[in-house]
């Protein structure tokens, strides 16, 4: 196994990957400056959320499921989070690195895809676009037949980082090129994909690339979604030169495996000191809208014993949720991200409180049991306080398990390369959660400094990027050259 690492270094696979990452970071680069995009992003998230909630039930359900999530709207780190990172890295707000913005089918997005096409062609790989604008590089197998796929998404959030998505593409291209030069054509076809969209940053849906690849989305969906300027996804797609019948159908039925390499976007690996993370499952997620109705009344003349205070009830529920989640333990997380109070006046006992609840867990039964238990607790609190509780479950996405055999291969490969690996759940959504529905799928994480992502401050050490590449190369070799497909 070590031969690949040495070869990777000798052959410049790592240099090739870093070079592609550098170039991608320049395409769609924003001005470096002193402002962080928290406010902007929050505003964008709120708008997207509003559009989503305003959409019809079908659209809403699809969007909701899709946002299970890629970090979709309403999910990105807000100002506080960005500032926290900023305070750590740049106490005086000076020298914030340039962010990268490549939104689906915009100019920077098209530049990046064309650039990658030229790069793939320059390396002697076959290139191919699908109808949605996902770009493939291909190393045909000697035995023909089915395909081993790697890659990630080329789009970014607004003023995002340079590694999210781009890393998996750059490493995939570098890996295919190095394997080709070292060992010639594989037995099974190897492909790298630069998926057109994952983030949900421009249109109120996520996973347009992998969703079309796996059949979750089809051509009819393109007319359903509009961006903030009113353009439909279909119009934007045609504007960029895609969507035509002459381009190949994005659906794939010939995949034997998909391996996605990605930055962690969390703090686990940094905290534990492990080199790589092997994802066992991408968490499932439920989102609820809760409304508590009590009685608005005079704050001076209503004795404490006679109140039906909706906000106090909500507060008790939130603390109960936090306590239950802490007691349950990792990787389950429960979050209330928004609360609204009526009438919201200093001298009136709150008559109504509405709050959100987001619960995630990698185990479907565990997620279900936790949510059911919590709703019973909420019901008991409401009854005791004389409040009327209504709960609406508006997103319910099941956990997406990764393939155990492929995960074991990644683990063995990391060990063979002398790396420390850790099995973990992914709390954020990824293309891999859609691909796992059609073929054995695995995900490999490398550390993110400070756990910061969806921010210009996103950073991973080059050595960590190279370690991930070495494991990816090793596993692709086993899958495509030795045909050890689990
Ligand atoms: Zn990503």
Image (spheres, rainbow, N blue to C red):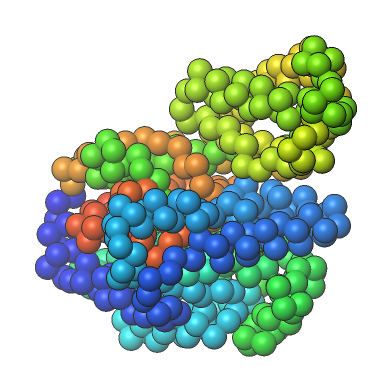
Residue 348 at x, y percent in the picture = 80, 33
Count of number-bearing discs:
0
Is residue 342 shown left or right of residue 102? right
Q: Nearer the viewer, residue 444 or 347?
A: 347
Q: Position of residue 246 (x, y in %)?
A: 68, 85
Task: Tell me which corner region of the image, top left, top right, bottom left or bottom right, holds residue 43.
Answer: bottom right
Specify whether 157 is left or right of 56: left
In the image: residue 219, left or right of residue 201: right
28 is higher (above) or lower (below) than 401: below
Q: Is residue 133 visible?
A: yes
What residue appears at the point 14 percent right and 64 percent down from the top-left corner? Answer: 9
- Could you tell me which quadrant the C terminus lies in? top left
Q: Nearer the viewer, residue 29 or 278?
A: 29
Residue 404 falls in image quadrant: top left
**338 and 216: which is toward the camera:** 338
Residue lying at the far front of the rendered structure: 300
* Picture residue at 36% right of the left edge, 35% below the top: 423
Give the residue displayed 84% in from the left and 21% down from the top: 302
x, y percent for residue 144? 45, 66
């Amino acid at each position: 196994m070590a031969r690949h690492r040495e070869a990777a270094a000798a052959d410049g696979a790592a240099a090739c990957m870093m070079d592609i990452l550098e170039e991608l970071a320049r395409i769609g680069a924003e001005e470096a400056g002193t402002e962080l995009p928290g406010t902007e992003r929050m505003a964008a998230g709120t708008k997207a959320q509003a559009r989503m909630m305003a959409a019809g039930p079908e659209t809403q359900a699809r969007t909701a499921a899709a946002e299970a999530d890629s970090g979709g709207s309403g999910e990105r780190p807000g100002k506080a989070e960005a500032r926290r990172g900023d305070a750590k890295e740049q106490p005086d707000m000076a020298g914030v690195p340039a962010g990268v913005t490549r939104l689906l089918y915009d100019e920077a997005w098209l530049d990046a895809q064309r650039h990658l096409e030229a790069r793939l062609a320059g390396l002697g790989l076959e290139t191919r676009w699908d109808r949605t604008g996902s770009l493939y590089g291909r190393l045909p197998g000697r035995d023909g037949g089915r395909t081993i796929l790697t890659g990630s998404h080329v789009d970014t959030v607004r003023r995002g980082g340079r590694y999210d998505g781009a890393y998996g593409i750059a490493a995939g291209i570098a890996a295919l090129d190095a394997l080709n030069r070292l060992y010639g054509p594989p037995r099974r076809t190897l492909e790298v994909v630069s998926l057109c969209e994952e983030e949900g940053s421009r249109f109120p849906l996520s996973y347009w690339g992998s969703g079309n690849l796996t059949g979750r989305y089809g051509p009819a969906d393109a007319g359903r979604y509009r961006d903030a300027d009113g353009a439909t996804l279909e119009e934007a797609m045609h504007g960029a030169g895609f969507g035509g019948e002459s381009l190949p159908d994005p659906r794939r039925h010939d995949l034997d495996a998909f391996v996605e390499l990605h930055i962690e976007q969390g703090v686990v690996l940094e905290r534990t000191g492990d080199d790589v993370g092997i994802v066992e499952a991408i968490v499932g997620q439920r989102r609820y809208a809760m409304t508590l109705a009590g009685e608005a009344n005079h704050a001076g003349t209503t004795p404490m014993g006679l109140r039906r205070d909706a906000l106090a009830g909500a507060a008790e529920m939130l603390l109960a949720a936090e306590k239950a989640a802490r007691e349950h333990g990792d990787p389950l997380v429960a979050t209330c991200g928004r609360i609204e109070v009526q009438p919201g006046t200093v001298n009136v006992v709150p008559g109504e409180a509405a709050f959100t609840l987001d619960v995630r867990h990698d185990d479907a039964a565990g997620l279900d049991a936790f949510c059911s238990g919590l709703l019973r607790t909420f019901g008991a609190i409401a009854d005791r306080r004389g409040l009327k509780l209504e709960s609406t479950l508006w997103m319910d996405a099941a956990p997406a398990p990764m393939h155990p055999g492929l995960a074991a291969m990644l683990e063995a490969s990391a060990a063979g390369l002398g790396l420390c690996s850790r099995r973990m759940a992914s709390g954020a959504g990824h293309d891999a959660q859609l691909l796992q529905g059609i073929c054995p799928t695995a995900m490999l994480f490398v550390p993110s400094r400070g756990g910061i992502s969806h921010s210009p401050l996103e950073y991973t050490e080059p050595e960590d990027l190279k370690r991930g590449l070495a494991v990816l190369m090793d596993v692709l070799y086993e899958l495509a050259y030795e045909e050890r497909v689990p």
